[in-house]
Image (cartoon, rainbow, N blue to C red):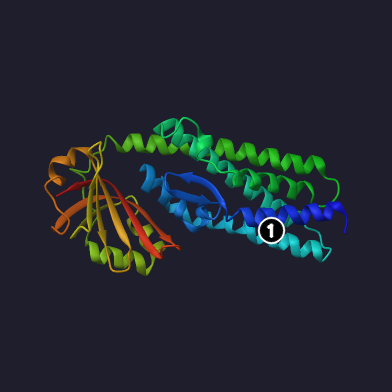
Amino acid sequence: MNKGIILHIVAAVLLLVTFFLPWLVWKETILSGASMPVGSFFTAAKNNYDVANPFPQFSFAFKIFWMIPAAAIVVVVFTLSKKSTFLPAAFASLLSLSLVLVYFLFSKNLVDLLGISKSVWVLVKPWIFVQALAAILLLLSAGEGKWILKISFIVLTVLATYFGFNIVSEQAQQKVMNEQFNSSEGTTTDYTISATELLKEFRANDSVTNKKYVEKMVEVSGIPASIDIAADSIATIRFEDSTGSFADFTLEKNQYHKVKNINAGTPVTIKGVCSGSIYSDILENTQISFKRAVIK
């Protein structure tokens, strides 16, 4: 077995292993490459920095990143079987580089916009760079020649991810800015439902229920499990069920005078715009978020 083949296998194994090792640390939350397809990436962003997924309706697309470890395994098997590994290597490598860059750019935005740290380097762990290096080596060592094609793939992937991320970020920021001028007070309610039934409906079929409720004004009644008021007077009211699933309502700032007089266990009716739900494979629960919420 020559050095090129050994390097190729080592790169594939590194890509596979480091996918599950720590890439980022946000406060007390450790995120690996698997956090994106699992669904915990934006959950951590919401819980730690109140930054939610701006387009939850596309969360299903993140499952494609499971192809990184899967393709890495295929590369090892194909290499040992003396088959061409160019396609699975390219697929794993380019997906990996794209994911690494998204993690880095997202963290940099948190630093720049929220001032949570003096430098993005405080948030990233060494394994994210090992992942990127393994991805580059995996593609470059796939077969002989094709150097221009391989390098072109790498450069185009980095550029497409960088500019694509910036475009999406600008759209998300504009979306938030527009929503700040649209209070929910006088907005027509699209659906009225109890918290218990809402959670039950999302657990039964979250893909269908997301299509029904996302970006709709929903009025929900129930008994809050918890009420949290941040230092900036922004409050969050949470409804939970016995499975650990929950619905979080982030209230508008002008609701502070109402929410400060409400205690957990007191029946309340809230209406807000549904941002969608995610299912956590780790916690095995459904997490629903609402924005622009007001107390009726």
Q: Is residue 241 left or right of residue 95?
A: left
Residue 149, visible in the rendered structure: yes
Of 62 and 133, the residue lying toward us: 133
Rendered view: 177 above or below 68: above
Q: Residue 233 is drawn in which quadrant?
A: top left
Residue at 63% across, 49% down: 96
Reading the image, the residue beneath label 1 is: 72
Of 56 and 70, the residue lying toward us: 70
Residue at 46% across, 30% down: 118
Rendered view: 129 above or below 83: above
Residue 167, visible in the rendered structure: no
Residue 166 in picture, x, y percent from top left: 51, 35
Q: Amino acid at mark 1?
A: Ala
Rendered view: 138 above or below 286: above
Q: Is residue 4 left or right of residue 278?
A: right
Residue 223 in picture, x, y percent from top left: 18, 60
Residue 7 in picture, x, y percent from top left: 79, 52
Residue at the extreme right: 2
The N terminus: image quadrant? bottom right
Q: Is residue 137 left or right of residue 164?
A: right
Residue at the extreme left: 261
